[in-house]
Image: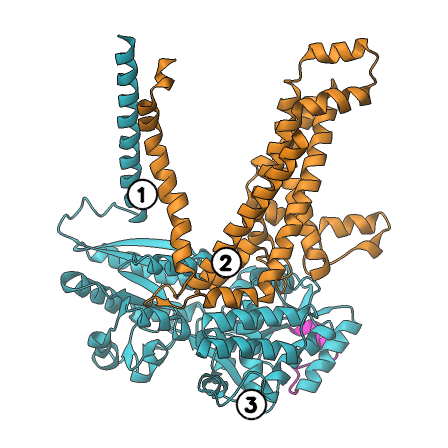
Chain colours: A cyan, B orange
Amino acid sequence: MKKWLHYLFVGTAVILISFLVACSGDSGEETSSGNDDGAEANDDAVTLEFWRAEDIGRADFEVFMDVVEKFNEEHPDIELQVNTTPHADYRTRLNTQAAGGQLPDIFQVWPGAELQPLVDGGVVQPINDITSYWTEETGLLDEEDFEDFSINGDAYAVPANTNPTHMIFYDEDMLADAGFDSFPETYDEFLQLVDELKANDITPIALGNSDAWVLQSVYISTIADRFTGNDFLEGVANGERAFTDDDFVQSLGVIEELVNKEAFNADLNTIDSSQMIDYFVQGRTAMVIDGNWGLSAILENMPEDKNIGIATMPLNDKNTVSSVAGTGHAINSDLEGEELEAAHTFLKYVYNEELWEGLISVGRPIIANVDIPDDADIHPLTEEMLEVIADTKPAPVYDATLTPAVNDQLENELQSITVGGSTPEEAAENIQRVAESEME
Amino acid sequence: MHLLKNRWIITVGILPALFIYLLFSIVPIFISFYYSFMSWNGFSEMQFVGLANFKELFQDSVFWLSVRNNILVVLASVFGQIPIALALALLLNRKIKGAKFFRTVGFMPVVISTVVISITWRMIYNSEYGMLNNFLEAIGLGALAQNWLGDPTWAMIAVCITIIWQFVGLYFIIFLSALQTVPNEILEAADLDGASEWQKTRFVVLPSIWNIILVSIVLCISGSLKTFDLIFVMTSGGPANATEVMATYMYNKTFEGLRYGYGSAISVLIFIFSMVLILITTKLLRRKEV
């Protein structure tokens, strides 16, 4: 008799366990699809899964999400499931999900080199059918605005803003104390400024390079362009130029020179890009170099009596600044029929005057032909930055142009230069080696 | 008891767990083997490249640096965590005032999330406002202050110290519970024979928990070989690969560099190294046991 009891016990256990497994499978799906409050409202609604990197507290992210929310309210026939991931993890999540063949319907993408593998892998579809909405119907954008998101002549996402990745924010009072009433106009004067600040016992420039992209995206993309010219990366790609060319090595030398002059805070490799803004805002350093996005963090945290100026690196006779379209949103290549139409409706709704007016009001340099709204409450510094940007010519951003493997190497070598591990020559050779192996 | 005699029932009972284990732990290892012969960026078609990934890997100086760093972590763990944990356990096994309090404190790092530990220690090590440098300056040893995590010569040492700190508590608790199983009769007998405290520890206590110590060493080695999260958050392998370990390097290459094939080749080597190291240690330690 007892034996039967045991069988019964084991049998129940097995059933229970398999049941548990089945359940956890279900709940897994539920969580991945995110909010479901719209689901009950309309059973016929087309469901779209929408992914975006999340920058909580950043004004431009909030402007965007407000528009998305409004879309959801005004379109009961389309159920948009919004799924945001913290910025730093978003790329990894997207890449992993793509490798597993499980991408959402609409998702945030980066222009250029980051978009390329998605297109090559055939996971995104062109939006050529609807670009006329912006270029003709509304006239909000021009044909060439789609360039950064175009690959082989097909457009894949709508650009919202340009993203100059190099701006120098400086404390006017600290510069005045060092004898500079205006920002240096030549590189020699800039070095002099660094010396003067050091003499006053002030750390000249705040740098947080623990994530390694700052020296690449913010520094080298602009600095190298001043030496090599606009077509350098193109030349590297087709073998006419190389990272070992003198002019590129010279630009690496600028980083080495600044490090040797102790122009940066000593903990540059252990703090990140938001901490470097903190250092500057707290008055620990006289300058910080960051992308245009740095301004929103500065405006939010700076003491009211701080006088801040904005400039770009005075280096060689050009005033180029590395710049690329900000992020866009691409459509999954599997979408068709009703769903595709819904996705198109979504893009047309979101990329519109309201978004662009909102973005420009919070200080993002937008691409669209939209003016600053009259009632907008724009900070004078924002206006100053937009003016500085208007004076510059664009240069390519390295991480938007190089393949991830080469970019990875470049960032590593830059970090290596800061700790005295590589000389500019060695660094250039190592980068070139990876670039060549990628081309094979 | 006859339940456990019936092999069929045992099999049925194990099946669900075994299935999940196979699916999520064993099968991926073989998939990794397969990927390691491919060139794949995760999006496009895979391309068979034979042993090219391994060839490149063997010439990759950063990979060997990561292997070296990983060995450092293993050594620091085995020779740091185990002796300290054992000493603490022996100490707190006695009737000391506040023993409970110290036990809790010792175990605390094990319960705290690794991310919290990493960020806290990153602040402690910070060269400008970090507690460690401030402390050194306060006691007049300012000359010893370092850019702990920013300087390649110190970064790995700093990371190892944190790893030791993080896991001492775990082995401490394991040893403490082992110590409580040492039979009192034997200790009393030793007392009657006039054994000193040291002799009691050396000849009675340690031999009776030796097996637990062995298990801990194996746990410690395998744990340090897969160390990832702490370093990833604390330095993400930087500056300039100075704190790269095999797992962070694999992650960087795979997910940041989008080279799934190369990353898989690194995984395969991690797997082989780990197997070899674990086999050697179990062999060596078994011999000692006899």
Residue B246, x across and y down, in percent: 56, 55
Give the labeled residue for mark 3.
A318
Front position among marks 3 and 1:
1
Residue B183, x across and y down, in percent: 67, 13
Q: State the SS at label 2.
A: helix
Q: Residue at x 24, y 64 (%)?
A: A346
The local crowd at label 2, few if under 14, some if 14 to 19, many if 20 or more residues have their Cα within 10 Å, is many
Residue B76, quarter of the rendered image: top right
Q: Amino acid at mark 3?
A: Lys
Q: Residue at x 43, y 59 (%)?
A: A92
The local crowd at label 1, few if under 14, some if 14 to 19, many if 20 or more residues have their Cα within 10 Å, is few
Query: The residue marked by circle 3 belongs to what chain?
Result: A
Residue B255, quarter of the rendered image: bottom left
- Decide which of A18, A132 is in the foreground and name it: A18
- Decide which of B57, B259 is in the foreground and name it: B57
Q: Is residue A247 magenta?
A: no
Residue A256, x across and y down, in percent: 68, 76
Please report the bounds of the magenta region as a residue range: A171-186
Q: State the SS at label 1.
A: helix
Residue A347, quarter of the rendered image: bottom left
Q: Is residue A174 above or below residue B27?
A: below
Please identify the quadrant where the N terminus of chain B is shown: top left
Q: Is residue A76 above or below residue B170?
A: below
Q: Amino acid at mark 1?
A: Gly
Please identify the quadrant where the C terminus of chain B is shown: top right
Q: Is residue B93 above or below residue B270?
A: above
Give the labeled residue for mark 2.
B266
- Decide which of B290, A44 is in the foreground and name it: B290
Query: The residue marked by circle 2 belongs to what chain?
Result: B
Give the labeled residue for mark 1.
A28
